[in-house]
Amino acid sequence: MTVLYLDTPVGLLDFCQQIQNSSWLAVDTEFLREKTYYPQLCLIQIANDDVIACIDPLAIDDLTPLFDVLYQPKMTLVFHAARQDLELLLMHRQQLPDTIFDTQLAASVLGLGEQVGYGNLVKTVLNVDLDKAHSRTDWTARPLSTAQLDYAADDVRYLRSLYHQMQQSLTELNRTHWLADDFAALSDPQTYQADPETIWRKIRGAGKLKPRQLANLQQLAAWRERNAIQRNRPRRWILKDDVMLDLARFAPDSLTKLSQIRGLEPRDIDRHGQAILDVLEKASQIPKADWPVMLKPEPLTNQQEALLDALMALLRQFCDEQAISPAAVATRKDIEKLVRGETTIPLLKGWRKQIVGRKLQAFLQGKLVIHADAKQLIINEVE
């Protein structure tokens, strides 16, 4: 099938008229994020059963005709690992499509692997080896070669077949409804919005700081996030994580002391030095009662560890019965939270609760008992 390369408004409009009556469309994007906070959209690949197109957003200023088609109420958009593609759509349209199908999520409930890559999924399901020669392409460079466009088109060429086969498998196994909550989360704008006030919790190493130092880190991280958004620059270009941790730990109060922070370059001090000092001064005024806390749960007791091991064995047993990878349902940390009595965890929502979560709860409530023979676990309900 010939791949259309669309780089004019007229060509885009003609294509949109051709696909507007589709009930579904396979979608992928190429973007660059190395030098910006927000991803720069470089190419959009679209396909249905009849046509494949690569649309050049660097050449076409107004993508409204395309978005009008993608956002039709009854249109299903098919992605693989949809989050970054949807983030781009949200940026450009300020809303998200209503109906989404993600083949990576579908793979997890079909026993094809947790967070499986597109190439591996195509190989497993379709027995096709994808060309990886252009995986490091600079998608901002023009012109794009025929080989580069074919490589990009493969991301939707085989997505069509994956969609059809996985839809059929989900229907046959009566698992289509399992994915409703996961797909709905992808359509929620809150999924893609970073909160400057809580972004500090994602910084590796924050758990080693004292509460006073965490207050510094919270203010520094919020300042960096707003600065990165305003300037559209990567966070690390504003302030690296390890430097920010040292700033939070030592709280320098002068430009001279700032210069003693390892990794903080003179140009960084010239550009941001006074702003950093102002942020740290603001943090020093936060009352002790308002210092953030990195909650560290108490270690599990020996009995709780034994219970955790039993629940992990049950998890594997129940997932084996459904031919699903246990990692797609719950991690050991999820099970640990269950042992601690937490209820707001993915394991106790949607399809995960139906096939495993409620059974693990039943075991904790004494409603299931387990014993074994030489080959397997045997699970019985308590009468």
Image (cartoon, helix red, strand yellow):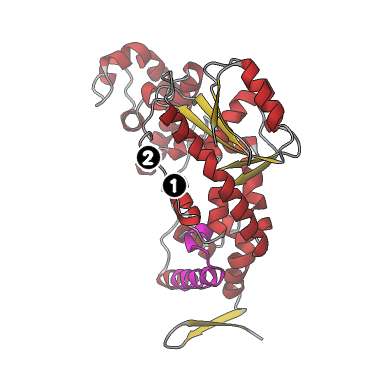
Q: Find residue 342 and report its horizontal and vertical position in percent.
A: 57, 58
Asked whether residue 278 is drawn in magenta, I would say no
* 341 on left or right of 184: left
The amino acid at mark 2 is: Lys
Q: Is residue 285 above or below residue 274?
A: below
Q: Residue at the location (62% across, 51% down)? A: 164
x then y, percent, for residue 157:
54, 41
Disc 1 residue crowd, few under 14, some 14–19, many 20+, Cα 10 Å = some
Q: Is residue 170 above or below residue 198?
A: below
Residue receiving disc 1:
119
Residue 322 included in the magenta stretch of the image: yes
User: Would you say 350 lies left or right of 333 here?
Assistant: right
Residue 286 lies, with reference to residue 299, above or below; the image says above
Which type of secondary structure does the marked residue at label 1 adopt? helix
Alpha-carbon neighbours of circle 2 within 10 Å: few (<14), some, or many (≥20)?
Answer: few
Q: Nearer the viewer, residue 56 or 341?
A: 56
Residue 6 appears at what percent x and percent y? 57, 22
Among all residues in the image, which is located at the extreme top?
Answer: 270
Q: Quadrant of the N terminus?
A: top right
The C terminus lies in quadrant:
bottom right
Q: Amino acid at mark 1?
A: Gly
Q: Secondary structure of the magenta portion, mostly? A: helix
Residue 300 at what x, y percent from top left?
Answer: 43, 64
Q: Which residues are magenta?
A: 307-330
Above or below residue 78? Residue 262 is: above
**Would you name the residue on which mark 2 appears?**
132
* Direction from residue 16 to residue 165 in the image, left or right: left
Figure quadrant of residue 140 = top left
Disc 2 + disc 1, Cβ < 8 Å: yes
Q: Residue 36, can we see it?
A: yes
Residue appearing at x 38%, y 29% in the figure: 137
Q: Secondary structure at mark 2?
A: loop
